[in-house]
Amino acid sequence: MSSLSRMLAVLDLLTAEAPAWTAEAVAQKLDCSLPTAYRYVRELAAAGLLRRGSGGTYVLGPRAIELDYQMRVTDPVLLAGRGAFQSLCETTGCDVVLACVYGDRVITIHQLQGSEGVSATYGRGRRMPLFRGMLSKVLLAAMPRAQLRRLHRLHEAEARKEAFAKDWDTLLANLKAIRSAGHCVSYGELDPDLVGVAVPLVSREHEIEAALGLIITRKRFALTDLERMLQGLNEAVVQIIAGLSAAESKPGVPVKPAAKASAATKSAATNPTATEHH
């Protein structure tokens, strides 16, 4: 690992459970010398990524807020999908969520709250469990085998705790079923009273590895047409990729939000039935 990578690893130490670190604790955790740990935190603080806290600690700095804002207003996928996200949210009443793969982690990068007002645990900015939940499973199913193998090896201990991924063969079989279906439905895997439905939003041309999903209560899902939900999600994926292609064909021109979903999409997932999907 390079010196720069080790310095940036300090940022990974700051979590909701452990938001403040001393240089001494950093040195112990990263197995580096105390002078090196001090250099890391000073340089990160100078860049605004850390700031001094109480008791000689360092906490996340204001630069993180600036970067979050920049991503929200400039990320090509978020801009290209703005209209599709809003339409899905309005027509389904569900929370709309988008997650992407970053290295060895899956992170929710966008969430719109629907009219149901569900309280999903994993909102924007939270790292998802790798082998649980519809977003992670859809993303794993879309990965090239070599990338999946590396991820499984890096997080084998986490995988063994999940029946879905308890061993390599079990994981492959379960992901094969998701690829064949083209979607994933998860029941209470992250929040006991919620159901998640997700489809892949993957484009090698645009270098996107993402998953687009809807979150709905179990009670309402039992009365909802799953096929209409999937229709709405898949139409949104088509619109987002088309928006990206249109933006990339105009170099130097900022990405414009994709047009709102078609009338067919607007009717998706809104016609309840008495059929329950399990």
Image (cartoon, rainbow, N blue to C red):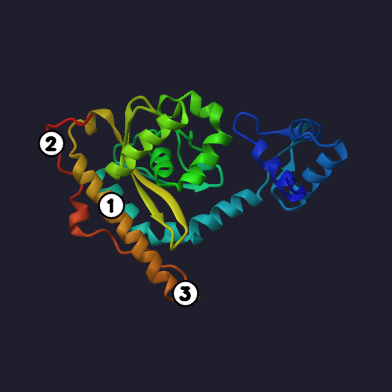
The kind of residue tagged 3 is Val
- Check residue 234 in the rendering and tell me which mark sits there, or answer none: 1
Residue 193: x %, y % from top left: 33, 26
The quarter of the picture where residue 182 lies is: top left
Instruction: State which mark lies toward you, 2 or 1.
Output: 1
Alpha carbon separation for disc pair 2 and 1:
20 Å
| Marks 1 and 3, the one that precedes in the sequence | 1
Circle 3 — which element? loop
Q: Nearer the viewer, residue 267 or 235?
A: 235
Q: Describe residue 208's horizontal placement relative to residue 11 as left or right.
A: left
Q: Residue furthest left?
A: 274
Look at 55% across and 42% down and name the residue there: 104
Gap between marks 1 and 3 measured at Cα: 27 Å
Q: Element under label 2?
A: loop
Q: Taking 2 as reference, is 114 left or right? A: left
Taking depth in this image into account, of 45 and 273 the one nearest to the observer is 273
Q: Quadrant of the N terminus?
A: top right
| Picture layout, residue 98 above or below residue 159 | below
Where residue 147 sits in the image (x, y, percent)?
51, 45
Judging by the rendered image, the residue that carries numbered circle 3 is: 253
Residue at image position (30%, 41%) is 94
* Amino acid at pointer 2: Thr
Residue at image position (39%, 68%) is 245
Are the residues tagged 3 and 2 within 8 Å (C-beta)? Answer: no
Sequence-first disc among 2 and 1: 1
